[in-house]
Image (spheres, rainbow, N blue to C red):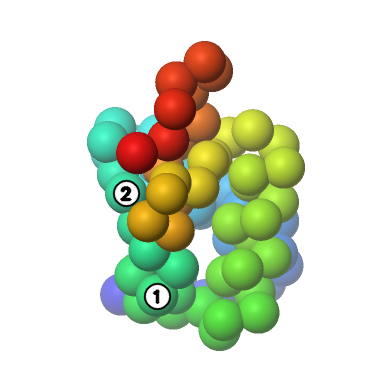
């Protein structure tokens, strides 16, 4: 079970750690919400921030994966 978070930056650190620990991790927004026990608004904000930071990218099916420079999202 996920630990409670005190700030959005704590959530960003946790999400980045999960994607770094599990290469190939691919999550839908709903899966991410459940995995990190987040409400929809917080989850969308964190995932959006990580896309803007080019840490994650959104795939054609709406899932999130680690950003790969020059590679098309599947």
Characterize the local packing of mark 1: few (<14), some (14-19) or many (20 or more) Cα atoms within 10 angstroms.
some
Label disc, if present, on residue 30 of the rendered structure: 1
67 left or right of 31 in image: right
Give the image location of residue 39, x and y in percent.
56, 84
Residue 38 image point, x, y percent: 52, 78
Crowd around label 2: few <14 · some 14–19 · many ≥20 (10 Å): some
Of residues 55 and 37, the one drawn nearer to the viewer in this rendering = 55
Figure check: 20 above or below 35? above
Give the residue displayed 65% in from the left and 79% down from the top. 41
Residue 27 to residue 7: above or below: above
- Residue 73, compared with residue 26, is above or below; it is above
Tell me the tag on residue 26: 2
Residue at x 34%, y 70% (from the top left corner): 31
Secondary element under disc 1, as helix, strand or loop, is helix
Residue 33 visible in the shown view = yes
Of all residues, the one furthest to the bottom in this rendering is 39
Q: Which quadrant, please, contains the C terminus?
A: top left
**Rendered-image quadrant of the N terminus:** bottom left
Is residue 53 left or right of 5 when viewed as pictured? right
Q: Residue at x 69, y 65 (%)?
A: 45
Measured in 3D between alpha carbons, the distance from the residue under mark 2 to the one under mark 1, in whole angstroms, is 12 Å
Badge 2 marks a residue whose secondary structure is loop
Quadrant of the rendered image containing residue 52: top right
Using residue 58 as the reference point, say whether residue 8 is left or right of it: right
Displayed quadrant of residue 71: top left
Q: Residue at x 58, y 35 (%)?
A: 55
In the image, 33 versus 8, the foreground residue is 33
Instruction: Return the residue found at the far top.
Output: 70
Residue 62, x across and y down, in percent: 44, 58
């Amino acid at each position: 079970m996920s630990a409670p978070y005190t700030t959005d930056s704590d959530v960003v650190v946790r999400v980045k750690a999960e994607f770094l620990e599990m290469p190939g991790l691919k999550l839908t927004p709903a899966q991410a919400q459940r995995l990190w026990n987040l409400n929809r608004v917080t989850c969308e904000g964190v995932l959006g921030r990580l896309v803007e930071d080019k840490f994650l990218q959104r795939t054609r099916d709406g899932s999130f994966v680690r950003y790969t420079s020059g590679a098309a999202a599947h």
